Amino acid sequence: MPSKIAIAGAGISGLATAYALKQRGHDVVVYEAQKRAGGPVHTIERDGYLVETGPHTLLVRHRAVAELLRELGLDPMIVEADSTASKRFVVSDGAPIALPMSPTEFATTSLLSPAGRLRILAEPFVGRFDKEGVDEPLAHFIRRRLGAEALDYLVDPFVGGIWAGDPRRLSARHTFGTLTEFEESAGSIALGAIKKRLLDGPDEATTISRRLISFKGGMKTLIDALTDHLGEALRLDSPVRKLRRDDDEWRVIFERGRARRGESFDAVVLTLPTQALADLEWENAATPPGAMDELCRVNHAPCCVVSLGFDRHDVGHPLDGFGVLVPRVEQFHILGALFVSSMFDGRAPEGRVNLSAFVGGARQPELFDHDDEAILDLACRDLGELLDIDGPPHFTHITRWKRAIPQYEVGHQVVLDRIEELETHLPDIYFAGNYRDGISIPDLLQSGQRHAQAIDETLRR
Ligand SMILES: Cc1cc2nc3c(=O)[nH]c(=O)nc-3n(C[C@H](O)[C@H](O)[C@H](O)COP(=O)(O)OP(=O)(O)OC[C@H]3O[C@@H](n4cnc5c(N)ncnc54)[C@H](O)[C@@H]3O)c2cc1C
């Protein structure tokens, strides 16, 4: 029998779970605190620029994600990143250097010294970690297996760009789990990768060739497609405040205007950020002592997205790539920048370029507290130096995310264990979100499907 299910939070996790539950015939209602859905996934059009306030791209490499986009009718709206986007720059000695993409480029790159390159090639001969099972910091794992230069110029800039994170604090197992598994299974990252390829081959049932995409109207298109399917079932501007157990139902108490209202459900999926989870009130149901506090201890890196439009003639760099990443050791302020108008057409007016710089992160969280003028100034100074820009921006837009990305730090397993404990303890309450299921949009689209399947099976029992 179909069940009535409430979903708290209309970010990508909530919307994906709601869509998949609806496809399975359940009656869903989604409550969102803000006046719009999508969390950081949002696009603004202004002065001929298309500006992403958060994610700029979506990496499709799983069949399930490609099929979901097709089901949502999004295929005609997909734009694939320009082929030059496979080129990424990393700053070394104050200048952007193309990341080597082939053995020949690796042999000649100036990004790493000859000794640094040899150290990477020696990886298969490095002994296995003698403390198996220990949750090792990512920086420690990479330095041990690939050397200090690989950490500084390959891993640290990418961790800054993807997680806005600090490899000294992130858990190797929870952020780069495939690599730690390779070491565990084969004694080396390289040998583990080769062994997997020889034994398993490409997993054609679940994976497809990688496509880096967005949509003609920007990333917001994905949110619009998911919310269109919900119609009246999406309640915006309706923060959930309290959950009350009434016999074998859950009463969801939410705010609308100044009034508190309630609706009853068979099950509730909580996709709220951890801080909002901690603020929830519970009635006739006790959460295990300390469990919510544990969730709140998940650190989140702050991040400002600084969108800038320049005259093409003022930019000396050819901008022939995805963007530029800045290693911590290079002493700039920005974590990196995306060459938005090089990746996708229609992101800037004729003769102009659209760049997005990222400021803050776990590396320099204090920069987040600077005012807009200061943030703009430091982003323009860094980009001016790195990309040889000689002229002021014609367009600026800053978006601030105080708790942008959850950090899977050493000890993250405790958080995952506590969530399981909460789910066991609280009947028909489920937890989903980027502090648990991965941080990328494709991870969360897939986890929405997994959660929906598990909830469906439990409720139909
Ligand atoms: C700057 C930035 C750049 C990124 N770039 C990329 C990228 O290029 N590619 C990529 O794949 N990923 C990227 N990500 C990561 C990805 O966007 C996020 O991990 C993902 O959007 C998180 O989705 P979520 O649903 O788990 O959480 P959220 O989007 O945070 O959703 C939670 C929702 O709950 C709502 N809420 C809070 N309290 C309540 C309440 N009491 N009641 C009801 N609702 C409530 C919130 O308003 C929010 O809408 C980026 C993230 C950021 C911040």
Image: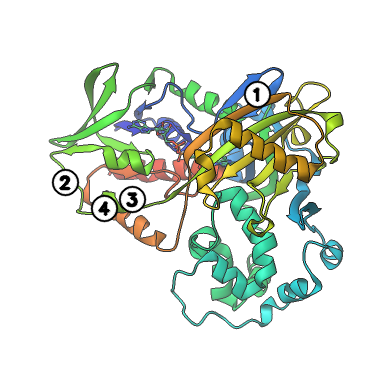
Residue ID for mark 2:
286
Identify which residue is drawn at 63% across, 36% down.
56
Q: CA distance from mark 3 to mark 2?
A: 16 Å
Q: Earlier in the sequence, mark 1 or mark 4?
A: 1
Tag 3–tag 1 contact (CB < 8 Å): no
Relative to 389, 362 lies left or right: left
Residue ID for mark 4:
291
Q: Which color scheme is applied?
A: rainbow
Identify which residue is drawn at 29% across, 18% down.
256
Q: Amino acid at mark 4?
A: Ala
User: Mark on residue 56?
Assistant: none
Give x and y (percent) for residue 124.
Answer: 67, 78
Residue ID for mark 3:
295
Secondary structure of residue under mark 1: loop
Badge 4: residue crowd in 10 Å (few <14, some 14–19, many ≥20)? some
Secondary structure of residue under mark 3: helix
Q: Earlier in the sequence, mark 1 or mark 2?
A: 1
